[in-house]
Image (cartoon, rainbow, N blue to C red):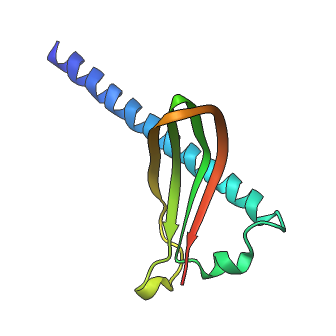
């Protein structure tokens, strides 16, 4: 009985880890798609700005909804340059969440892609 419980626990832990990894992989893929769309659109972010950026954060499909109470929710990824003064190659991505809310006279909904670049 104890071995069976241990086996079930191991299977659940492995399944949970794989689910989380697949979720993060999907988030990175969506972020990459948004970046490609932005880069390939001539009137959007100039490539020179992205080339000078220390960090770039992408939130694909930030959702905002309001009916008296407003909420916003998004999941994305940020990548920064490595090395002294952020002058090295791009590092590994980090996962971030964007959440917020407010109260007041408001109604509506919106889904938008959010990209921010930090540079000097």
Task: Looking at the picture, tell me which residue is in the foreground, 55 or 44.
Answer: 44
**Residue 105: image location, x then y, percent:** 54, 33
Q: Report whether residue 16 is seen.
A: yes
Residue 2 as seen in the image, left or right of residue 27: left
> Where's residue 110, x and y in %?
66, 38
Rendered location of residue 86, percent (x, y): 47, 82
| Residue occupying the point 58% across, 70% down | 117
Give the quarter of the figure containing the C terminus.
bottom right
| Position above or below: 16 against 98 | above
**Residue most extreme to the front:** 105
Q: Relative to the observer, which residue lies in front, 92 or 106?
A: 106
Q: Residue at x 74, y 74 (%)?
A: 46
Question: Looking at the image, which is closer to me, 53 or 65?
Answer: 65
* Residue found 51% across the figure and 66% down from its top: 79
In the picture, measured across the screen, residue 35 lies left or right of residue 93, that is: right
Give the quadrant of residue 109. top right
The front one of 92 and 95 is: 95
Q: Quadrant of the N terminus?
A: top left
Please identify the residue farthest to the top as the structure is shown: 1
Number of numbered tags placed on the structure image: 0
Residue reaching furthest to the left: 2
Question: Do we see residue 29 in this rendering?
Answer: no
Where 79 falls versus 49 (above or below)? Answer: above
Q: Going 61% across and 82% down the picture, which residue do you hit? A: 52
Residue 103 rendering spot, x and y as whole percentages: 45, 35
> Which quarter of the picture shows residue 94?
bottom left
Residue 49 in the image: above or below residue 74 = below
């Amino acid at each position: 009985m104890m071995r069976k419980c241990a086996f079930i626990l191991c299977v659940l832990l492995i399944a949970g880890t794989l689910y989380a990894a697949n979720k993060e992989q999907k988030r990175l893929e969506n972020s990459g798609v948004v970046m490609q769309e932005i880069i390939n659109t001539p009137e959007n972010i100039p490539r020179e700005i992205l080339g000078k950026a220390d960090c770039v954060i992408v939130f694909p499909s930030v959702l905002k909804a309001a009916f008296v109470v407003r909420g916003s929710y998004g999941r994305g990824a940020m990548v920064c340059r490595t090395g002294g003064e952020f002058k090295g190659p791009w590092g590994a991505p980090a996962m971030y969440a964007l959440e917020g809310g407010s109260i007041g006279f408001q109604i509506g909904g919106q889904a938008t892609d959010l990209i921010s670049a930090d540079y000097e």
